[in-house]
Amino acid sequence: QVQLVASGGDSVQSGGSLRLSCAASGYTFRIACMGWFRQAPGKEREGVARIGSDGVTTYADSVKGRFTISQDNAQTLHLQMNSLKPEDTAMYYCATTDNSGGCRGSIRWTLFGNWGQGTQVTVSS
């Protein structure tokens, strides 16, 4: 099992920046890739960004050019969010998968089995 603790969420104005972090512990050697997801009230959970153990990154179209996912090591994941918009408001979750299938194609939350508790991001106009 992998334990994940997300942090860094806050309330900011439109155009502002935030940096989310996610600390992983436990069986991190089994992680195939890590990702950030978000869920706004009344909406479905969606994939935001993903990074594989090989460093390959994938982004949702809605955040390309504004968000950057990175890893310090297998234990720490970040999401740098710039030019934030009100539609970025959501609870943000970090997650991992040991299923290599989850590291290809679109970012599908159903293929990620380990989840952190979420950190709230609110962007006001």
Image (cartoon, rainbow, N blue to C red):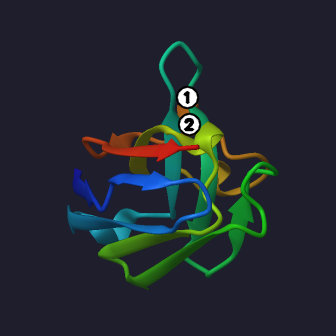
* Picture residue at 33% right of the left edge, 75% below the top: 76
- Quadrant of the image for the C terminus? top right
Instruction: Give the foreground label among 2 and 1.
Output: 1
**With 110 as the anchor, is 94 left or right in this view?**
left
Q: Amino acid at mark 2?
A: Trp
Residue closer to the observer: 68 or 82? 82
Residue placed most toward the observer, 65 or 112:
65
Mark 1 surroundings: few (<14), some (14-19) or many (≥20) residues within 10 A = some
- The residue sitting at 61% across, 35% down in the picture is 46
On the picture, is 122 further left or further right than 68? left
Vertical comparison of 109 with 94: above or below:
above
**SS class, disc 1:** loop
In the image, residue 21 sits, relative to residue 115, either above or below, namely below
Q: Secondary structure at mark 2?
A: helix
Residue bearing mark 2: 109
Q: Which residue is mark 1?
A: 45
The reply to whether residue 30 is in sight is: yes
Q: Which amino acid does the dot numbered 1 rest on?
A: Arg
